[in-house]
Image: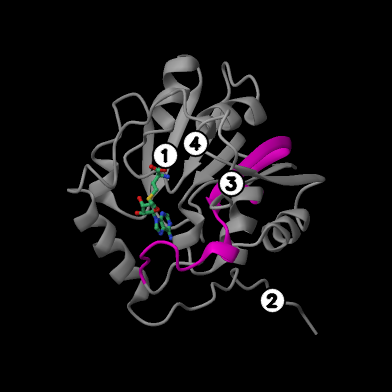
Amino acid sequence: MSWLRLPARRPRLTPGLEQRIRRSFDDASRDEEHFPSTIDPRIYHVKLLMEHLGDLAGKRVLDVGCGKGRFARLFQERYPDAEVWGLDISEEMLKFVPAGIHTRAGSMTALPFEDAAFDAAYATESLEHAVEIDAAVREMCRVVKPGGRIAIIDKNAEHFGRLKTPEWEKWFTRKELERLLAKHCRHVSSRFISYWEDVEPDGLFLAWMAQK
Ligand SMILES: C[S@@+](CC[C@H](N)C(=O)[O-])C[C@H]1O[C@@H](n2cnc3c(N)ncnc32)[C@H](O)[C@@H]1O
């Protein structure tokens, strides 16, 4: 008997859901107040990403679900000789990403990149929209080199309901994402964070850090 090599099977989303999500973010791209194209570089989320991902001078880094590239632009400013990439499902969001950052439209559940293409990858408040969460985490880890760093910032499932969310949005417990990351990474940790380093986290935001 011969073994056929079948293409990786993508779990199927509810028909039309991916399109609906894309359209919703295409529309949301016009809402600069709630989907801003910049972020204050002093915000702790930025500091934590920079610290965990380490020195990216001359390296390749991927922002997964980058939106308008508010984090990617800070990486580009800090490391002008790094190759910064932003991937998003919404082409309208990508239109706001500053020149010099490479962009690619696509889904974080099937990243259009080779294995080990990046030195580091991060996702900020995008995994919550991925629906196929296992696939998205697996893909982030796949495209990072062994030894490379991964960071995810997202919301805590124990606070679900605190904000208005679309029906597909999912928040996570610490253990849930730690377990998923640990399938692909050697070192995994998580912690509560707030926008400002000197303000006690209120439990809404979590950061997961991993090294492949
Ligand atoms: C709340 S915004 C966050 C954007 C950006 N990470 C930030 O912090 O500014 C969520 C982003 O995830 C993107 N997104 C949703 N589902 C996605 C998917 N399956 N693959 C890639 N991007 C996705 C949306 O288009 C949107 O730009």
Task: State the CA–CA distance, disc 3 to disc 1.
Answer: 15 Å
- Residue type (three-letter) at the residue carrying disc 2: Leu
Residue 130 located within the stretch drawn in magenta: no
Label 3 environment density (alpha carbons within 10 Å; few <14, some 14–19, many ≥20):
many
* Image disc number at residue 86: 1
Rounded to the nearest angstrom, the CA distance separating label 2 from label 4 is 50 Å
Give the residue drawn at x 37%, y 29%. Answer: 101
What kind of colouring is applied to the model shown?
one colour
Does residue 194 appear to the left or right of 38 in the view shown? right
The residue beneath circle 2 is 4
If you read the primary sequence from the N terminus, does the residue marked by circle 4 or circle 1 appear first? 1
Q: Which mark is residue 152?
A: 3
Q: Earlier in the sequence, mark 3 or mark 4?
A: 3
Mark 1: which secondary structure? strand
From the top left corner, tell me how far across and down residue 115 is, in percent.
63, 46
In magenta, the rendered stretch is 142-166
